[in-house]
Image (tube, coloured by chain):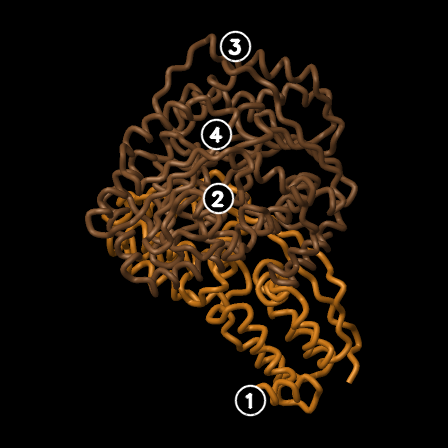
Chain colours: A orange, B brown
Amino acid sequence: MIAKTPFEFHTSSQLVAITGRKAADLNEFLAILKEIEDSSIFYHVHHAFREYQFAPGLYTNDFAHWVGDELNENVLAEKLANINIKDYTEIKSLRARIAEIVDNYLQANPDSGRLKARHKFYFCKNVGIIQKTRYAAWDLEEFCGMLHRVGLRSLFFHFFEARLRLGRKSNDFSDWIKFNFGDERLARQIEALDPYLYTMDQLRDQMIGLICGNKDTIMGRILKWLKAR
Amino acid sequence: MAKSKIEEYAKIIRPQNFDELMLLAEKVRGRRLRMVNATSVGGGVAEILTRVVPLFNELGIKTKWEAIKGSGEFFGVTKAFHNALHGSKTDITEQMLNIYNETNKANLADMSFDDDVVIIHDPQPAGLIAAKENSKAKWVWRCHIDTSHPQPDVWNFLKGFVEKYDASIFSTPWFAKGLPIPQYFIYPAIDPLAEKNRELSAHEINAVLQKYKLDRSRPIITQVSRFDYLKDPLGVIETYKLVKKHIDCQLVLAGGGASDDPEGGQVLKEVQEAAGNDKDIHVLLLPDFADLEINALQRASTVVLQKSLREGFGLTVTEALWKAKPVVASAVGGITLQVIHNFTGLLVHSIEGAAYQIRYLINNPQAAKKLGEYGREHVREKFLITRKLRNYLLLFLALENAGKDIIQL
């Protein structure tokens, strides 16, 4: 089946900028968190996920990391680490949730707000540079083949950045499949993946498995054959 | 020196990342870039520029590189600046500031800046910003050193220049300062195809070990760095002595000099005195371009040590990690970005801590191997020259789209 419009793979590169804002304790952290640019929140909830691809699950978001490692506030660190970014499709509500968790913790543990960290938290942000790649898929089989060939930054852009940073309510892959092929079930399955628990390579494999793994396509047959081995 | 072709990197990094680099380069092809630093030979900055400049040209960025000229007196002043910016208490006199200003002014007379982007590396040539008013270029100050706790008078002097740039680049967020200009964060990087990092045959490694009379049947602990107090070479010897009480090992302290570092001779003398007559301490003052030797020494090491007291980034650590070596390193400066404790290496805070962790690794080769493997992957993702090229290309685009958080090409 041919799509009405091709899926044009984009990629997104990130240049990290230093905002100059830094927090020495939780009180300062909360105050800055409430007003820092959206791009800073986006950066810190994805930075470890993007950078430690070879070590799945070891690192959560930067906020949890700092609270645990530098302040030894392990309960709060676990609460922050447990935020599922996927539940949010806009930075505003994600920021509000992070602030709420820290705020509630400080109300219950007021002394924690003044504990000085060994190292300050430096708020960074990223400048996202979005570019169209040479890959455009017209059907699902071609789509799976290209998913193998595009970089992980492309996957990140369509799955994470489009959804949370650019305000699209779903990931781009699901939207395209729903609109072009009317396959709402498949679109829902992709949207239901818990991407933050996989490395990007694993996420790519999960998607290809969902899209082509059960279909009688060349890619599907290759995957079945690989599985059988 | 053999130049690497850009395509060769596609075999080292993910091919998709390589494709993306080429895609990005298409968008900035034809831009003119000028790099200026203090020395063309010796030290990490010159080393990376030697590799990066030809690659930029190959990507279609017309890149020139110049080193400023200065007297021994000038480099004495800038070394004092360097130490003061790293936080050491240093006396800075009015006369020293005059020498700095006059040398920068004299260099300006011989230079022109008809480029799109000018990147000035470190404090020595920062005063060249005076040429900005007659130039259409975007000016960027690239700081390679740890400025997290600078001596205020020196930083304030330097800040007067830095504030006039269009942007600055630091190696870690915590080196950044309160500046009215955009500050970016770009990791330094190593070149996996450079003589210092390329794969070596067993024959090549053994030849170097024979040359320096090292015995491969006993553990070798190595620190590669300039002879500089901030690299704590005397602390390295103390560490070795603590390990030696338990393990029959050898120490290699290897480094070269740099033309902008007049202190090196004195430090070397003290190190040789501390080493005394111990035949298992090998203090090697290597000449410029001894990259093959350094590569072989790192690869032959049982453990690589970096016992710095302060560190900008610590590219010698990156080199060791890339060679999948277990690394024991001080938790200072940019080392903490590279060595994630118990994952890509071991971080220490004292001579005793360093000695203990070295003993642990020598006695636990499986754990050492695992740390080395993770260390190599960490470098592959973050600290190779291809990532640096990519970041500079992004920087050009950010400079052309100032103030935007999302740039759609």
Task: Report helix, strand or loop for mark 4.
Answer: loop
Q: Are marks 2 and 3 on the same chain?
A: yes
Visible residue check, residue A35: no
Residue bearing mark 3: B98
The percent coordinates of residue B35 (x first, y second) are 65, 32
- Give the number of the mark in front: 3 or 1: 1
Residue B294 marker? 2
Q: CA distance from mark 1 to mark 4?
A: 56 Å
- Left or right placement of residue B46 versus residue B312 in this view: right
Residue drawn at the location 60% of the way across and 25% of the way down: B164
- Residue at x-position 45% and y-position 43%: B211
Secondary-structure class at tag 2: helix
Marks 3,1: beta carbons within 8 A:
no
The answer to whether the residue labelled 3 contacts the one labelled 4, judged by CB atoms less than 8 Å apart, is: no
Q: Chain of mark 2?
A: B
- Which is more N-terminal, label 2 or label 4? 4
